[in-house]
Image (cartoon, rainbow, N blue to C red):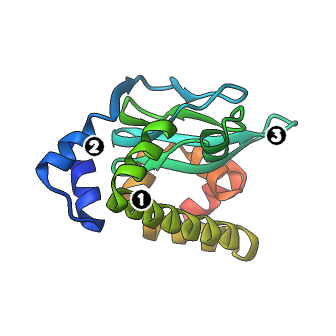
Amino acid sequence: MSELLKNQFLKIVELSEEELDYISGHFIYKKFKKHQFIVQEGQAVVYDYFVISGCAKSYYTDENGKMHIILFGIQDWWITDYEAYYYQKAAQVNIDCIEDTEVLCLSNENREKLCREFHKIEHFFRKKTNRRNVALQQRILTLLSSSAKERYEKFLAEYPSLVQKLPKQLLAAYLGVSRETLSRLYSN
């Protein structure tokens, strides 16, 4: 198990080395190249991905071909199409790599198995899901109620290292603004 994932578990629950070793046996390591898809719209989603290194984006493309970035997956974060993952549906979003990315993959079947066997793991995933729900609610509220400048400043404050990694068109798509608007914000 990567130290990152081990530390993420241990921040929330107490686990012995033996338990950690057992849990780690339920993950699969994968490496993706820059621009490679992790999840593609219309396909089955087998895994939730824990990012060890790199950066990926989850996005939806509307009927006009406009990309709407839902979230980024960076080191120490989880990313997948959760509706497709939990309900065995076809993916509605794409997830592809902004840079070479290494992940640990956990199937829904293995997650459920671990949750049945360890109350502590069920607690861990409940806490992670709660945090994700709150973050997504905050993102939606920010999109609905904040100006482009406020959204940009909030992103800069929360993810300063991520701003350096992202091409401007991806940051614009995440913030829900045009590239031109983003350029004006950069220059202010």
Total labels: the figure holds 3
Percent position of residue 18, x then y: 14, 46
Q: Earlier in the sequence, mark 1 or mark 2?
A: 2
x, y percent for residue 76: 34, 51
Query: In the rendered image, is residue 112 in sight?
Result: yes
Q: Mark 1 points at which residue?
A: 122
Image quarter where the C terminus lies is bottom right
Judge whether 107 appears above or below 129 on screen. Answer: above
Q: Which of marks 2 and 3 is in front?
A: 2
Whether label 1 touches label 2, CB < 8 Å: no
Residue at 57% of width from left, 51% of height from top? 71
Q: Distance between the residues labelled 3 and 1?
A: 35 Å
At label 2, counting other C-alpha atoms closer than 10 Å, the crowd grade (few under 14, some 14-19, many 20 or more) is: some
Q: Residue furthest front?
A: 117
Closer to the N terminus: mark 2 or mark 3? Answer: 2
Residue 1 visible in the current orientation: no
Nearer-the-camera pick, 4 or 159: 4
- What number is the disc on residue 58? none
Instruction: Identify the residue shown where x is 27% and y is 34%.
Output: 25
- Which residue is identified by label 3? 62
* Secondary structure of residue under mark 3: loop
